[in-house]
Amino acid sequence: MARVAASRRSLLGHSYNLVGVVAALVILAWTLIAIFAPAIIPHSIGDIVDDDYFGPMRQGLWLGSDYLGRDMLSRVLMGARYTVGISLAAVVIACFSGVVLGMIAAVTGGWLDTCLSRFLDAMNSIPSKLFGLVVVAAVGSSIPALILTLAVIYIPGAYRFARALAVNINTMDFMTVARVRGESIAYLIGSEILPNIIRPVLADFGLRFVFIVLLLSGLSFLGLGLQPPLADWGALVRENIGGLPFAAPAVIVPSLAIASLTISVNLLIDNLPQKIRDRDA
Amino acid sequence: MTSGVLNLVLKRLAIAVVTLLIVLFAVFFATSMLPGDTASILLGQAATPEAVAGLREAMHLNDPAILRFLLWVVGLLHGDLGTSYANEMPVAALIGGRFVNTMELAGITTLLSVPLALTLGITAAMLRGSLYDRAVTILSIGVISVPEFMVATLAVLLFAVYLKWLPALSSVNEAHTLTDLVRIYAMPVITLTFVISAQMIRMTRAAVIETLSTPYVEMALLKGASRGRMVLKHALPNALGPIVNAVALSLSYLVGGVIIVETIFNYPGIAKLMVDAVATRDLPLIQSCAMIFCLGYLLLITVADIIAIMSNPRLR
């Protein structure tokens, strides 16, 4: 699919292909929906607007109604807010902390590097879903708690990735020169290392975002994520799971929303120009 | 095996042990943070403060956390998993049967998904760029990109709602005949197989493609070996290490998969037990279940790493 699409030059000087552009548009659309959801939903998410539950798609209720007869379209649009918002906040914290720690470890070396690497590798050996389950059960599922939990779970991965890249840069001559000049660690990681690893780090950011969306949806599906009356896409699937035997749109649509977002991010990263995507360094 | 490899393997094993200790620590303290006072939850709202204090004393809840941690680890070493708070049964007895159920689920999934994924992954790599390869790649990206519960709900929609071949729920107790057994396991196994295979196909394909681009495979091509011979005789033996590594790594995804699958299909396994234990704040049960999952996961990723070390010809 990717290869049949003709490459073309864009304003930015990279060649893009059709799949990548479509994926980027889907991501943009969900982002806009997440920002403007309260302004564009046709019904309030709590209003019961249908006499029947698990109503079919029809005029006025474009995506049918849920298990209480609420408008599904409004609930999915608002769900985008929580799924995209929480995941984005979590991935920003995870990647920022992971990358900064990774670069510091690579530049400093020694016992700090060893201790940090051992500890974070151990954290990585706890399956993410299990980790999420236990921690969310412990600290609760308020939105800040969820964001922090998801961020903590994915810091080790971001750390490992950034450290591996930074260690290679660290052996370059310009690093030795900068050290001899007596530059501070903040300067070394901010001005010498970061510019050289930023592209693969951004690609990693996208992948980690997908992992977080999937984990958040999984937790919400288990009933340990966002609590009612708030509902992200995973929680929407959970609360409407009773509609599965009737193949109600209420249970299918939120799943499709998750899939459209995560598949788009994956396809976008896969179709980025090689220069940006290059992960082996 | 030379001493170099032996050293690396021993080092990897030592890391695994250190990791296990940190994991033990993390699991214990994460579960100690669970909200609510266990003693007052157990005794209910009508309990007198004296009774709650007495129970706290009896359960060692007043002791410092580090002491309770040490007691717990010593207990684990003796094979004592503690007593469930909820129904006062030994945790080991609660876990026993459930553990067998989960292992059966994981075992059947492994038996199905490994041959399936290897066949698809290797053939896709051989026919790289063909329509078949693209179909396999897109399908596996698709499965990886969606949550496990979506694969499960789609499987229910397809097999139970539209085709009506299989029941949507499992209950191991109702199995009397072989057909019953197949019908019970089918849905969870299908879902898990999809999730595990997708990962395995991608890694296997990448491993074989990497080997196919090496100079010695090119040499085989140049000296006129057939495509099949080139892959089977020259590429595959060298790709074996990475492939086995990919299999072990993919199997570690089973851990996350069973949590969702057992919940959605109501399968009486250890993951369902743990999700229920989280709901009732049954600390010893949560700790033991979490430990079993972490152990399994750690075992698989350690095995994967050791295979990667041993199969590296530069170290042999």
Image (spheres, rainbow, N blue to C red):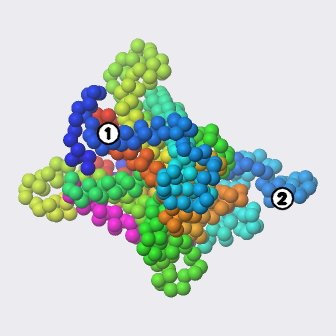
Location of mark 1 (residue): A21
**Alpha carbons under labels 1 and 2: distance apart:** 58 Å
Amino acid at dot 2:
Gly
Is residue A280 located in the magenta-colored stretch of the structure?
Answer: no
Say left or right for A96 vs A200.
Answer: right
- Give the magenta range: B101-128
Q: Measured from the top left, where is residue B236 in percent x and y?
A: 24, 60
**Which label belongs to residue A281?**
none
Q: Measured from the top left, where is residue A178 in percent x and y?
A: 39, 17
Residue beneath the point at 60% across and 45% down = A44
Chain under numbered label 1: A
B42 vs A162: above or below: below
Which type of secondary structure does the marked residue at label 2 adopt?
loop
Location of mark 2 (residue): B44
Chain under numbered label 2: B
Residue beneath the point at 44% across and 22% down = A190
Nearer-the-camera pick, B61 or A274: A274
Amino acid at dot 1:
Val
Which type of secondary structure does the marked residue at label 1 adopt?
helix
Nearer-the-camera pick, A23 or A29: A29
On the image, which quarter does residue A205 sit in?
Answer: top left
A4 vs B208: above or below: above
